[in-house]
Image: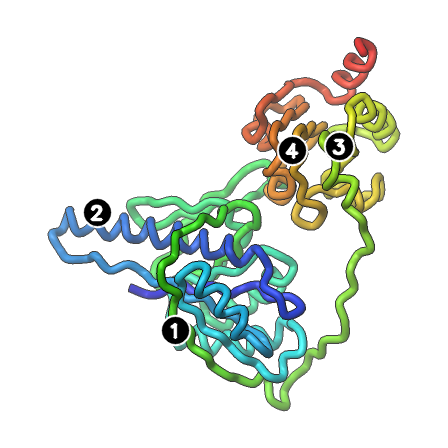
């Protein structure tokens, strides 16, 4: 059976934590394919006990320490792809190096993180591999005709279920914060293969200059015991003042926000909760008018207790809440403050 290939996420020479989530997602696919194989064996009487192996590719100038870390922690086979002239990530270098290598491996699936880096090179890699591509996968399940993959659509308020045509490799970008790594009780490390390749030769058209990072300080959010987070459901920018007063009624509190409010300039990036903001774990998280995109949910999923206030009881945030209050956010806050 064709292998499952994972492209480890490497940034500034370090392994990013989303790599462990990619391995968890690959194990879901592995388990579902084994289940389907067992069902075919039972139905057809054929011996189909084989199931796909997982192989992680670690690209970089010095990939061996990272490869050894993955191998010993997960027992997964790792291919350390040494690229001596890769000073820093570029999509061109990744596609030039990974394309020929992955064609040799002939996998059924290629798993990439749905991050700024993964979203940058995955579509072009799929084109080079003549592969199908599904971005932002947040659920994988079995179907009698193959595996089904879900991804958020309609401003993250619904999930679209897709079944790719058989016979093509499949590039998946996996949404961070969805597939939780689990301790597997590894007894033996996986094998490690070192392969060296140069990127592009004299045909390089893209040169890395530098990485510019937003200057932000999420410490107040990370230290807060209660976070009151505002979304587009607050209606108007002026209503944030009421949200702030509402938050002040709780001790050790901070005000958070969903990405749209930050993008519109209503509130600073220091307040953003989500994949591109802060990952928080307060004792109480109050979501005010937040629909609950998968990116936002990934940033607050470690909260002990979640209360959502939303007039749409079918909003995704409600299914991830301990208590869902179906009401207009501002009406609720004004009533609460009057009672207080």
Looking at the image, is 337 positioned above or below residue 220?
above
**As drawn, which residue projects farthest toward the top?**
339
Q: Residue at x 58, y 32 (%)?
A: 316
Q: Earlier in the sequence, mark 4 or mark 3?
A: 3
- Say whether marks 4 and 2 touch (CB < 8 Å): no
Label for residue 105?
1
Q: Which mark is residue 39?
A: 2
Q: Which mark is residue 291?
A: 4
As helix, strand or loop, the secondary structure at mark 4 comes to loop
Residue 84 in view: yes
Residue under numbered circle 3: 230
For the point 46% across and 44% down, the residue is 139
Of callouts 2 and 3, which one flags the residue occurring earlier in the amino acid sequence? Answer: 2
Label 4 and label 3: CA atoms lie apart by 10 Å
Q: Viewed as shown, does residue 36 lie left or right of 101? A: left
Does residue 60 sit above or below 265 in this rendering?
Answer: below
Q: Is residue 128 above or below residue 273?
A: below
The answer to whether residue 121 is left or right of residue 145 is: right
Q: Secondary structure at mark 2?
A: helix
Query: If you read the primary sequence from the N terminus, does the residue marked by circle 1 or circle 3 appear first?
Result: 1
Residue 301 placement: quadrant: top right
- Please, what secondary structure does the residue beneath circle 3 have? strand
Q: Residue furthest front?
A: 187
């Amino acid at each position: 059976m064709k292998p499952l290939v994972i492209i480890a996420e490497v940034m500034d020479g370090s392994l990013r934590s989303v790599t462990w989530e990619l391995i968890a997602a690959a194990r879901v696919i592995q388990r579902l394919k084994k289940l389907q194989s067992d069902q075919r064996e039972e139905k057809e009487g054929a011996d189909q006990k084989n199931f796909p192996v997982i192989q992680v590719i670690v690209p970089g100038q010095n990939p061996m320490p990272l490869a050894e870390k993955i191998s010993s922690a997960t027992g997964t086979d790792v291919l350390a792809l040494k690229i001596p002239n890769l000073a820093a990530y570029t999509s061109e270098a990744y596609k030039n190096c990974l394309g020929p290598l992955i064609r040799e491996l002939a996998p059924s699936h290629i798993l990439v993180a749905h991050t700024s880096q993964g979203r940058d090179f995955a579509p072009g890699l799929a084109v080079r591999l003549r592969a199908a591509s599904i971005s932002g996968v947040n659920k994988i399940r079995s179907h009698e005709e193959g595996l089904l993959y879900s991804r958020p659509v309609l401003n993250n308020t619904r999930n679209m279920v897709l079944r790719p045509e058989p016979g093509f490799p499949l590039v998946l970008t996996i949404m961070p914060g969805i597939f939780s790594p689990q301790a597997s009780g590894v007894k033996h490390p996986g094998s490690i293969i070192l392969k060296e390749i140069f990127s592009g030769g004299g045909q390089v058209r893209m040169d890395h200059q530098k990485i510019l990072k937003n200057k932000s300080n999420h410490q107040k959010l990370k230290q807060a015991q209660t976070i009151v987070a505002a979304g587009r459901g607050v209606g108007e920018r002026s209503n944030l003042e009421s949200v702030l007063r509402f938050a002040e009624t709780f001790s050790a509190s901070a005000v958070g926000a969903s990405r749209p409010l930050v993008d519109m300039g209503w509130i600073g990036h220091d307040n953003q909760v989500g994949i591109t903001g802060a990952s928080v774990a307060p004792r109480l998280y109050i979501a005010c008018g937040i629909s609950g995109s998968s990116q936002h949910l990934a940033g607050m999923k470690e909260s002990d207790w979640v209360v959502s206030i939303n007039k749409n009881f079918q909003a995704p945030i409600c299914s991830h809440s301990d208590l869902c209050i179906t009401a207009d956010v501002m009406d609720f806050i004004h009533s609460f403050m009057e009672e207080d």
